Amino acid sequence: MINLSRFPSLRQPEVKTILSLLAAAVLSTACVTTPYVAPQSGPVADLAVRITAAQGQSFNLYIYDDAESCSGAKTVIDDAGKVNISATKLVADKWTTFGYFEVMGKTSCKLNFSFVPRAGHAYVLDAATGRGGCGANIVDATDAKAMFIVPLVTRSVKSAMCLPLKK
């Protein structure tokens, strides 16, 4: 609890503004990760990312180094550059786990999901915010005439952020 009597020159609205800015700064630094680096050799799959966040929302998409434990987050895309379309490559033929985090005013949405990209395939990951929260899907776009939604393993349910992989 902050004792405002020690700061008689500050008005209540100013203190709330300062505290809000401080909280935002702490939250944004808590989510800082290193950038994702696409594989330089071995079997790969292409990935295009489209994020549809409401105007003014903050978002991040990560790939975890350890797909099983959801640890070692690497940033694929975030709103720092106000860019919401990106392309990269993924290691193919092994589990890949993504984390998506979005701040919507005073609430936030976080989800983790996994799939196994296949070598030589092209995928499109769409993340969007709706009335009930945020969501993501991945489409296999290798054959533009026969695209299909890729089954994802949802790793987040309520407070559990990294459920075991269903292999």
Image (tube, grey):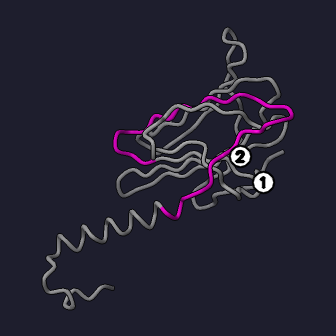
Please tell me whether residue 53 belongs to the stretch shown in magenta.
yes
Percent x, y of residue 44: 80, 31
Percent x, y of residue 22: 36, 69
Tag 1: residue type? Glu
In the figure, is residue 104 to the left or right of 95? left
Question: Which residues, given as a range, are shown in magenta?
Answer: 29-58
Please tell me whether residue 32 belongs to the stretch shown in magenta.
yes
Indicate the quadrant where residue 69 lies: bottom right
Residue that numbered label 1 is attached to: 68
Q: Is the Cβ of the residue at disc 1 closer than 8 Å to that at disc 2?
A: yes
Vertical comparison of 60 with 145: above or below:
below
Residue that numbered label 2 is attached to: 97
Tag 2: residue type? Thr
Indicate the quadrant where residue 49 lies: top right
Distance between mark 1 and mark 2 Cα atoms: 8 Å
Percent x, y of residue 81: 45, 42
For disc 1, the neighbor class at 10 Å (few under 14, some 14 to 19, many from 20) is some
Q: Residue at x 80, y 23 (%)?
A: 120
Quadrant of the frame with the C terminus: top right
Percent x, y of residue 131: 40, 41
